[in-house]
């Protein structure tokens, strides 16, 4: 293959591959009470209504975050999820998020009220509150995930280190979910 043909082939591949999403921006701040707040921001290539469904419903979570999710039969404000496809509600390795406040299409505030049995620093993490904020950005959605209340302790610092990376990966998965749907024409 000559240089011209190689350049054409490279250009054709570049057109076929979707553009990479903007990277997730991660920042942290120390509050007046010395607790830490983590902020993760990303732009998702999808309309705000679709991103809202992805973060606020079991079906949405299963499209990008976990293989199984459901609303608790005891409390419609509790989303239970698992990374294990074989899990059922109440299994030892499930995670439960309690929705504290919702403004549909804009804001979802939640706390983790159940973690897998072996989750480190659970007693510390149960005091952390997380907030998804959505903002329309043309045909895209700006997503901000703020997690606040990490105490200035060894356990709190270990959790900050874990979720600094973990929440970035989570938002990257959300970005990929919408890139894939955009490419295959699904758009939802």
Image (cartoon, rainbow, N blue to C red):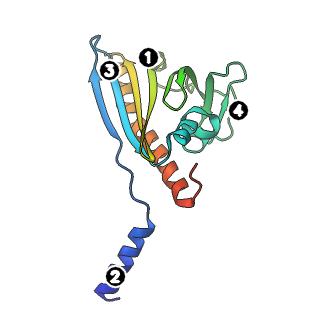
Q: Which residue is mark 4?
A: 88
Q: Nearer the viewer, residue 96 or 45?
A: 45
CA–CA distance between discs 1 and 2? 56 Å
Pointer 1 with pointer 2, Cβ within 8 A: no
* Residue found farthest to the bottom: 2
Left or right: 115 with respect to 73? left
The mark closer to the camera, 4 or 2, is 2
Q: Earlier in the sequence, mark 2 or mark 3?
A: 2
Q: Position of residue 162 (x, y in %)?
A: 39, 32
Q: Earlier in the sequence, mark 1 or mark 3?
A: 3
Residue plotted at (36% across, 42% down):
24
Q: Which residue is mark 3?
A: 36
Q: Nearer the viewer, residue 55 or 103?
A: 103
Element marked by disc 2:
helix
CA–CA distance between discs 4 and 2? 52 Å
Left or right: 35 with respect to 129? left
Q: Position of residue 29 (x, y in %)?
A: 27, 24
Q: Which residue is mark 2?
A: 6
CA–CA distance between discs 4 and 3? 34 Å
Residue 158 numbered tag? none
Left or right: 78 with respect to 172? right
* Residue found farthest to the top: 33
CA–CA distance between discs 1 and 4? 26 Å
Q: Position of residue 32 (x, y in %)?
A: 26, 12
Q: Earlier in the sequence, mark 1 or mark 2?
A: 2
Q: Nearer the viewer, residue 70 or 102?
A: 102
Element marked by disc 4:
loop
Q: Which residue is mark 1?
A: 124
Residue plotted at (52% across, 59% down):
183
């Amino acid at each position: 293959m000559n240089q011209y043909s190689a350049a054409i082939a490279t250009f054709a591949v570049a057109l076929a591959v979707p553009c990479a999403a903007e990277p997730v921006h991660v920042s942290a701040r120390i509050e007046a009470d010395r607790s830490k707040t983590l902020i993760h921001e990303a732009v998702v290539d999808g309309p705000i209504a679709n991103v809202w469904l992805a973060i606020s419903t079991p079906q949405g979570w299963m499209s990008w975050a976990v293989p199984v999710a459901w609303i608790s039969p005891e409390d419609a404000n509790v989303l239970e999820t698992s990374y294990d496809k074989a899990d059922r509600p109440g299994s030892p390795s499930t995670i439960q998020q309690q929705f504290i406040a919702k403004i549909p299409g804009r804001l979802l505030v939640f706390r983790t009220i159940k973690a897998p049995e072996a989750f480190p620093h659970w007693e510390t993490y149960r005091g952390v509150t997380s907030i998804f904020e959505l903002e329309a950005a043309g045909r895209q959605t700006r997503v901000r995930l703020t997690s606040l209340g990490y105490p200035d302790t060894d356990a709190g610092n270990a959790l900050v280190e874990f979720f600094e990376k973990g929440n970035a990966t989570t938002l990257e998965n959300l970005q990929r979910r919408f890139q894939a749907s955009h490419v295959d024409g699904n758009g939802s």
